[in-house]
Image (spheres, rainbow, N blue to C red):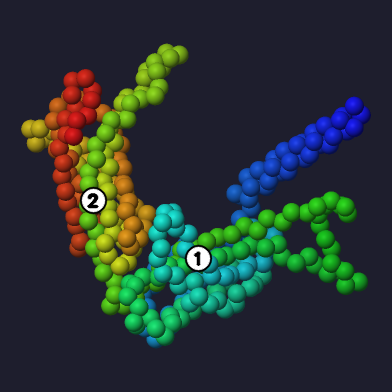
Amino acid sequence: MKEQLRVKNEELRMKFGVLAFFLQLLTLNFSLLTALAVEVEPTRLELKIAPGRPVAGELQIANKGHKPVEVRLSAGPYRFLDPKLKLPSCQEWLRFEPARLTLAAGASTSVGYTVTPPANLEVDTAGEYLGAILVDEHPAEEPVNAQGERRVEGPVAGSSRLTIVPRLALAVYVMVEGKERVEVEIGGLKVEKLASQAGATGGREAAPDLLKMSVVLKNLGSVHVRPAGTTTLFQEDGHLYHTAPLGKSMPLLPTATMAIPSLLPLPPAGRYRWVITVEVQEGTVLQQESSFEVTPEGEVVQ
């Protein structure tokens, strides 16, 4: 019996220990949101490169915090939102000078970067290569006293010390001159009703049902685009009922598909004509329309 109790006590200590550890990580991750002191401009690189011609530029790095920091730069892979996308990388093309530096509180400096394409770039068929610039913020080294000893601030002896390294990841898009082809198509327009989940409780009115209109874009080109546009709704008699900008979208990568939704309160019963206008780039505009009906019962029929 004593042995069983001892085992249960050990299991209980382990469970509490694991719980405390995850609570500590949660607290540290929350504090990380305000711990980032380093800012970098520009926030992304969009470059055009020719075979055999490296491209150079500068990053402006500033320490907005109240303590000195050590900044380390390296190249990394592009972070795809869609894991099925497989696009060529420019990670190995990036170099930084210096790749490691210390910034005092409130200080700023510039770091040079070089993008050097490989010799076989001309024979490759890709029009764009992707990568990332990783900017890690480390604590600056502890000062040395007169005896040559480093002053270490942190937990007492015998306890563990966890150091969190904040990281910025800046997207890099490198397009190849002569191979950049912009081609986007509208893959479809979809209209649906989103029923309200809120009820008229506590004296509050129920939230209205919504109309969700989604346009699907497909990138058939060789480089990424950032499409923008407007959605316009006409009543059956031709009167304008609603118009709104779609806003600037996230990058639509080559071979990728993107659905851009827009929401508005469900219109009154009747027939409607929906016109979508998409500006792929300056001078390239796509337009498509669809019709649907809102029934007296509040249903949407496309």
Query: Where does the N terminus fall, quadrant-wise?
Result: top right
> Which residue is label 1 attached to?
77
Q: Callout 2 environment at 10 Å: few (<14), some (14 to 19), or many (20+)?
A: some
Residue 130: x and y in percent read 43, 67
Residue 5 in the image: above or below residue 253: above
The Cα–Cα distance between marks 2 and 1, rounded to whole angstroms, is: 29 Å
Residue drawn 18% across the image and 24% down it: 295
Type of amino acid under label 1: Pro
- According to the picture, the residue beneath numbered tag 2 turns out to be 187
Query: Quadrant location of residue 111?
Result: bottom right
Count the numbered circles shown: 2
Q: Is residue 156 left or right of residue 235?
A: right
SS class, disc 1? loop
Residue 45 in view in this figure: no
Residue 108 vs residue 100, the one in the foreground = 100
Q: Is there a contact, CB below 8 Å, between mark 2 and mark 1? A: no
Q: Quadrant of the C terminus?
A: top left
Say what amino acid the circle numbered 2 marks.
Answer: Gly
Closer to the camera in the image, 88 or 296: 88
Q: Please give left or right for residue 68 compared with residue 200 in the image.
A: right
* Vertical placement of residue 103 versus 241, above or below: below
Residue 225, x across and y down, in percent: 31, 61
Image-quadrant location for residue 265: top left
Residue 301 higher or lower than 104, as above or below: above
> Callout 2: helix, strand or loop?
strand
Q: Position of residue 209 (x, y in %)?
A: 31, 26
